[in-house]
Image: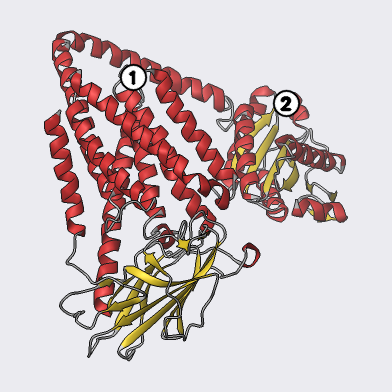
Amino acid sequence: MFKTIFFALCITLCISAPVAAISQPKAEAGELDLRHWSFEQDGTIRLDGRWAFYWENFIPPQQRALASDETIMVPGIWNGHERGDTQVVTGHGYASYQLRVLLPPDTPQLALKVVDIGEAFKLYVNGELLHSAGKLGTNAQHSRPGFSRSVLTLPEDVGSELNIVIHVSNYHYRSGGVWNVITLGEVSGIRTLNELELGYAIFLVGSIGFIALYHIALYLQRRQDKSPLYFGLFCVAVLLRILATDDRYLTLLIPSISYSMLVRLEYISFLLGIPAFAGFISHLVPGAYPRWMSQLCVYMGLVFTVFVMVTPIEVFSEYLTLFQIYLVGCVLFGLYVFSRCVVEQREVARAFLFGFIVLAIAILNDVLISMGVIRTPVPLAGAGMLCFIMIQSYSLSLRFARSFTQVEALSRELEGYAHTLESRVEQRTRELEIANTKLEQLVSVDGLTGIANRRAFDDLLNREWVGHTRRSSQLALILCDVDYFKLYNDFYGHLEGDDALCKVARCLSDTLQREVDTVARYGGEEFAVVLPDTSIEGAIKIAERINRAVRDLHILHQGSPVSHELTMSCGVAAMVPTEKRRPGDLVGLADRALYSAKAAGRDRVVAAGSEPGTAGKSQPASADSEVAENT
């Protein structure tokens, strides 16, 4: 186990090694001397150090002289900053930061990289406003938080020095101040730095996102084992954490995201990531610890998450220390579990412990950075999480590979018995498929006409009703009835009647021009036509086309009082489905319209809310028809 810990520490040092940089000058007493710094050879420089600090004072941006002996560390928060012997700065308030930067001769055109000064700010260089975020204010009513991630190009001729003034206000978050690094360099160097950081973030997001999808897909393929699901959800939480913190890359994907939502995601990502990871451990190494410990971890994470979702930023951000204690406690608990698994010589336990130690060190590093205890150059959580996730993915793949090997061995043992069983299963499967096909036809297809039956019509209408309710679009229905069909049966016999119904059903199906339109046998000599996304006017035209098509069949009907040939009456209705209405309302409208068509003499089309006209016609007659068309 000690070798595992040693190698984990080595990996962590390798992760943090690239962030080490050459010794850079620091700001002292509000001044940074760069007269011996070469931007072409030495590269970019962080404006770290002690800046001049003016609490509760927005100094004039053009002020060049340092009018205050009070200084504050940048990057850092102003919480707890001591002013004299009595006053201690709180998280809420406003202040000015000032830094004079002495430049070398023949300085190239410079640029600044600024990330998320909290929570609202204006940045001036040599008296000119260069950038701002949120709305500055001297109280909570006049202040509005904002976020920014920008590369700011300075004017070409800035002279021999830069006078940087930053006005900052904070009334919504627990901490205020210039808490992120501000970097100065020539334009190409700053842009290269920005592109490298963006590329690093894309690499992290892409890698972790792919691993998350892979493990969720594994769970969907085999749901008996939930460890890949929890691990995939943990990866999603890590992904959100990376996007919502540091350089706030989530704002590139969702430019309209609000400040409050971004901060909530920053908190929720690790509060939900912990329960997901606890679920992963409990399913991966069952019995390694009491179940109540896992449940406590999950319930605390869910309670904290709800608390963050329902309270304002200024409330839940005050509990960051409590959340961090919860996080550190869970990390220590995870170390205990994996160490115990190594002692018990459980499967791939060493790999899990190795990866978790790397993750734990990276998380503790970032927690200490946020608390202001240490000042390592960059956060390590992203790289540490990626290292841990890749190790766990490899371990899970080994686990699956061993499972597959065992399955293959069992398969070879049962191969002799499988041949007979397979043939029987195939035969039975074919029989079941044939039976299922026949059953589906019996259930949904009318046995006489070959079109959809009443049950299929009801199912279709219910589905279309739900879809049109969601889209708020019109759904039309035509109810058709063969005129005096009982007299037809009495005159020609039921065999001829069945043949006539089959011809009418084929005629209705051929008349419909869209694949989404459906004709069904509603009952006896009645048919129903469902027309998705169709207005009342369009439905009337289709009904008139159906009416003419049936007459054009020229089926003799000597017993009909209407015509010597078979005719059809149609009732048309259309409405926009809502949650308060039911499919039966549309059927009722169409049924009443069909009744009106019959009462008016048959062989015609009548729309709901319209007066019956001549055969195949319908004319809106009142305000009711206008309602039907717009319903």
- The residue indicated by pointer 1 is 289
The residue shown at (32%, 16%) is 287
| Mark linked to residue 193 | none
Which x, y percent locates residue 302? 50, 34
Q: Quadrant of the N terminus?
A: top left
Return the residue nearer the eye: 556 or 64. Answer: 64
Q: Are marks 1 and 2 in contact (CB under 8 Å)?
A: no
- Residue 222 visible to the viewer: no
- Label 1 or label 2, whichever comes before in sequence order: 1
The residue shown at (40%, 19%) is 291
Which x, y percent locates residue 548? 69, 49
The residue shown at (51%, 38%) is 304
Secondary-structure class at tag 1: loop
Q: Which amino acid is tagged 2?
A: Asn
- The residue indicated by pointer 2 is 489
Closer mark to the observer between disc 1 and disc 2: 1
Residue 234 sits above or below residue 266 on the image: above
Q: How many marks?
A: 2
Which x, y percent locates residue 103? 27, 84
Q: Report crowding for label 1: few under 14, some 14 to 19, many 20 or more residues within 10 A (C-alpha).
A: some
- Would residue 277 appear left or right of 526 to someone viewing this image? left
Which x, y percent locates residue 395? 20, 32
The residue shown at (24%, 71%) is 192
- Residue 34 visible to the viewer: yes
- Would residue 601 appear left or right of 85 to someone viewing this image? right
Q: Which amino acid is tagged 1?
A: Tyr
Secondary-structure class at tag 2: helix
Residue farthest left in this picture: 3
Return the residue nearer the eye: 196 or 620. Answer: 196
Quarter of the image holding residue 384?
top left
